[in-house]
Image (cartoon, rainbow, N blue to C red):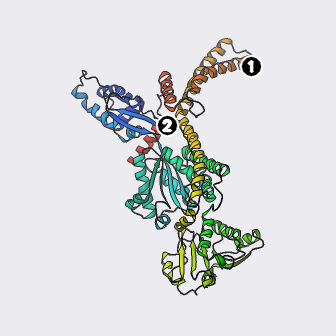
Amino acid sequence: MAVSSTLSGAKWERLLVNSGSSPSASSLRAYSLSQQQMKAFSKPNRGKKGLAQRIGGVRCEVAQSDAINEGERIDPSKASALSALEQLKTSAADRYTKERSSIVVIGLSIHTAPVEMREKLAIPEAEWPRAIGELCGLNHIEEAAVLSTCNRMEIYVVALSQHRGVKEVTEWMSKTSGIPVSEICEHRFLLYNKDATQHLFEVSAGLDSLVLGEGQILAQVKQVVKVGQGVVGFGRNVSGLFKHAITVGKRVRTETNIAAGAVSVSSAAVELALMKLPESSHATARMLIIGAGKMGKLVIKHLVAKGCTKMVVVNRSEEKVAAIREEMKGVEIIYRPLTDMLACSAEADVVFTSTASETPLFLKEHVKNLPPVSSEVGGSRLFVDISVPRNVGSCVSDVEGTRLFNVDDLKEVVAANKEDRLRKAMEAQAIIAEESKQFEAWRDSLETVPTIKKLRAYAERIRAADLEKCLSKMGEDIPKKTRKAVDDLSRGIVNKLLHGPMQHLRCDGSDSRTLSETLENMHALNRMFGLETDISLLEQKIRAKVEQSQK
């Protein structure tokens, strides 16, 4: 979408005053000349060499300043005011208006970054509102959302400038995590507008997960919306994007067979453990689950689904374990307090860890003295750590008779069904493409909302004024019924007159009208009815950001 960058006369006058130039005759002369120059920002000038930048499918060309007639001489005494104006044209406020606010995702995932980096960048759910507030406090960030899971750390923003916005967010991530900017840049991925939209839709559908169709990520996307409600900075664009992503995730799972097989990190963890055990020991292997939260409960469910009928669960309190035991009737679930963790580990063949602890529960010194396990289960004790931050230190893998797996090792489970994954992904991609088009059409339609509101307000002012004149001429004793009839008549006439222009301002994908045609109609109406005399909402935001950065 294009964004009109013509600043109002009043705004330029204020900016000139703020820059130190007095509103003298020379300043006004310079301002008059600038009006012709500024038209270049709203009209393409393909005959001149200019700055062409692709913005969301619409190509906007900003022509070089060429509005001053060659034969027109400028008095030297006026040169200083004109020079100040030229500097203003390249000021921060003007630079912003040359590009549309962009949806950007700056992320690191299991596909691009090791778990050591992701756990440092991870932001707890309780801290998401604070993070959104800090991100929106950056000079070039308008809206923000945080999606932080065990497999990914992604920040979605609406940026007034792509380059500057990415730079600021990356520096913020470095500051909060302690990871150098250069290291984050090495592992991050950047996506803009349509690509960012498609990525989130794929994430919500489970296509970007290690386990295809993983249902847990959809619940996490829903949680982003739930936590973001009422948070300043979780604005209309980002909120709309995540809500649409939820719709996509639900539709993909309903219309495809994507949820068949392993559909969560927890189920993949169970499958991985069983793959490493001899098949003959699946029913007899001693299972220990540390942590009875959401992930731990899912591990228990998947173990039961695979035929396990006895397991030990270590947790801080027995309440959650008792609730799981009540739900899993017919399965022997033994509770042990956290203080018994090492003793229980000594009696286990497979240890699943899924707690929210920020420090490792198991290190080399904890594991090296554990008794060896039976050769019937392969002779090695398995630690399957699905927590981020990790519950088991990497040093544990150095202990003889011990094998350690974390979330990065779940790729092995995914590889087992690669062919089926590709087939289901193709089905889901068709749905995502359709939904992406609908979301982009919705976002495009937002461009014309200010013009629609201004045009309606303009028509309403005329209607109300002329209605008042008409009623005053009819006298004060006219019946209420007559007054209402005249009022309804005036409203009906206005609505019918506005119907055509309003239809040509809508771009929701329901007809063949392109975005460029809709924007041309918008600019034409703005010119015809003088609707651009007020400072646009975007310009107000830009000015606020510039003033904030100058404090």
The total of numbered circles placed on residues is 2
**Which residue position is annotated with label 1?**
480
First reached walking from the N terminus: tag 2 or tag 1: 1
- Secondary structure at numbered mark 2: helix
Across and down, in percent, residue 218 comes to 62, 55
149 relative to 41 in the view: left or right:
right
Q: In the rendered view, would you say 118 is above or below 46?
A: below
Q: Is residue 37 left or right of residue 144?
A: left
| Residue 21 locus on image (x, y percent) | 31, 34
The CA span between labels 2 and 1 is 40 Å
Looking at the image, residue 219 lies above or below residue 15: below
Residue at horizontal 66%, vertical 78%?
A: 280
Which image quarter: residue 284? bottom right
Percent position (x, y) of residue 465? Answer: 59, 19
Kindly indicate whether the residue at mark 1 contacts the one at mark 2 (C-beta within 8 angstroms): no
Mark 2 vs mark 1: in front:
2
Q: Between 196 and 66, which is closer to the camera in this rendering?
A: 196
* Three-letter code, disc 1: Lys
Residue at image location 58% in from the left, 42% down from the top: 434
545 relative position to 282: left or right? left
> Which residue position is annotated with label 2?
537
Outermost residue, left direction? 76
Vertical side of 549 occupied by 113: above or below: below
The 10 Å Cα crowd at callout 2, few under 14, some 14 to 19, many 20 or more, is few
* SS under mark 1: helix
Mark 2 is on which residue type? Leu
